[in-house]
Amino acid sequence: MLWSFGEQLLRRGSGVVIQIFLARLLAPEDYGLVAMMSVFIALGGSLMDSGLSQALIRLPDAKQVDFNTAFYSNICFGVLSYALLFLTAPLVANFYAEPRLTALIRVASISILISSLRTVQEAQLTRELNFRLKVLINLPSGIIAGLLAIGLALKGFGVWSLVAQSILTALLSTLLLWHFQKWRPTAVVSGSAFEAMFAFGYKLFLSGFLDTVFNNLYVVVIAKVFSGPVAGIYYFATRLADLVIQNLYTSIQAVTYPALATVQNDDKRLKSGFRKTIVLTTFALFPCMLLLAALAHPFIVFFLDSKWLPAATMLPLLCLAKTLYPVHAVNLAMLKVKGRSDLFLGLEIFKKLMITAVLFFSFRLGIQGILYGQILCSLLAFAPNSYFSSSLLGYTLKEQASDVLPNLALAMLVSIACYFASAQLDWAPFYKLVALGGGALITYAATAYFLSFQAVAIIASLKSKRIAS
């Protein structure tokens, strides 16, 4: 998990640094255009994979024919996805009354075709828990592509610099995967292998499809109801919040699923593994998310210019809305480990109906209303997400709450104190970020140590096991 988190942190961290440079060079309108088409590009990516990589990871004894079948299927789905995006691009442009989107979508979706060539190699690395190699592949790809985007932005290419960045990232990471991962496809495929993987994977695909639609639904509504620049500011603020949340979220999903899939029939070990994962990730995540919310204003003022200042009011609420995401991720990973993609899909449908209902009322209250609606949806999702962990593993809602609440309470106290200190002190933004943020993290860790938090005991246990080995 450390390698996975490190890969996400370095890749996304360097990505945010690059995005900050780009934000100084580009206008919110440019990010608004990217936000408008992001949902459609993301849907194309979901269709390309169709859940086959997740099914491949879960197979206990995957053979060459399984890898071949998934590889060629992903290419076919990738071509289909690109064709659909190419044909529907004018409809998207008409929907937003933004003719530039036609060319943007048709070019940006090339990244889907490129990515279809690497899904099997990525699945193999995940099966092997080889996240170190993923760091060596994804980090330089993101940095090189980001530097190209900055160069293009300096030359006045505007939004096209962001499109070029996404395509070059996909191309470089694909080439490096083929270089380092020595698996190569052969001509042998199997219809029965496809049926077996698709029978499990299509439910995850539909779940992911729904998740992609509704994760981007807010951007669609904001761009349609308000304006492109407002959508661009919201999109950029979301990416800042995702620097922390997606690091842990993706790391949890990437590691927990393949690792615990090896003991999928041992409920006692599964419960212990999931419980430790929730304790450790919330212990690490809660202070980071809540401190980012508390210091959002000095963060935006220090790193960006005045055109992005509205993001300082959006970022705290986005952080609060996303704080519980890793807890949701662990509960959903449990369903995949147990092979219950049917329950996974049903749960996603239920939650999306809930999101639709909340958004229907909240958008009438403006951007702030939409953000508060996201917080409400995250809180309401905790009970249904944890229900099946209770019924399938005996990891009850009460146990989850007892594991999560101490970390949450301490992080909230430290962050609230940090927020009021920031409001009262007439310091430069840099000193607020370093002194208050650093001091808050030290206080959080020291308090947890002296109060003997469960996470501290788990870390000490893992450290002693590593030394003994």
Image (spheres, helix red, strand yellow):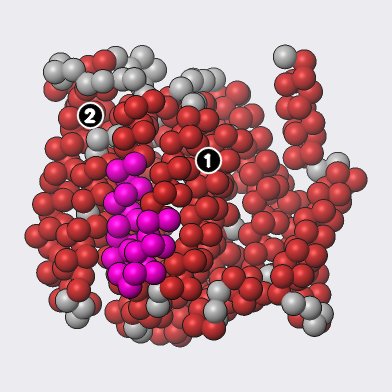
The x, y position of residue 229, in whole percent, is 38, 80
Q: Amino acid at mark 1?
A: Glu
Q: Residue at x 22, y 54 (%)?
A: 109
Q: Quadrant of the C terminus?
A: top right
- The residue pinned by badge 2 equals 71
Q: Report which quarter residue 192 is drawn in.
A: top left
Q: Are marks 2 and 1 in contact (CB under 8 Å)?
A: no
Q: At numbered mark 1, what does the secondary structure look like: helix, strand or loop?
A: helix
Q: Between residues 384 and 375, which one lies in front from this camera angle? A: 375
Residue type of the residue flagged with mark 2:
Phe
Q: Is residue 117 left or right of residue 282?
A: left
Q: Which residue lies at the image location 12% right of the left edge and 69% below the top edge?
A: 90
The answer, for residue 205, to whether it is visible in the render is: no
Q: Closer to the camera, 313 or 401?
A: 313
Residue that mark 1 sits on: 7
Which mark sits nearer the N-terminus, 2 or 1?
1
Q: Is residue 159 magenta?
A: yes
* 161 relative to 463, above or below: below
Query: Magenta residues, as a range?
Result: 147-172
Mark 2 neighbour density, 10 Å: few (under 14) some (14–19) many (20 or more): many
- Write the residue at 34% across / 20% down: 182
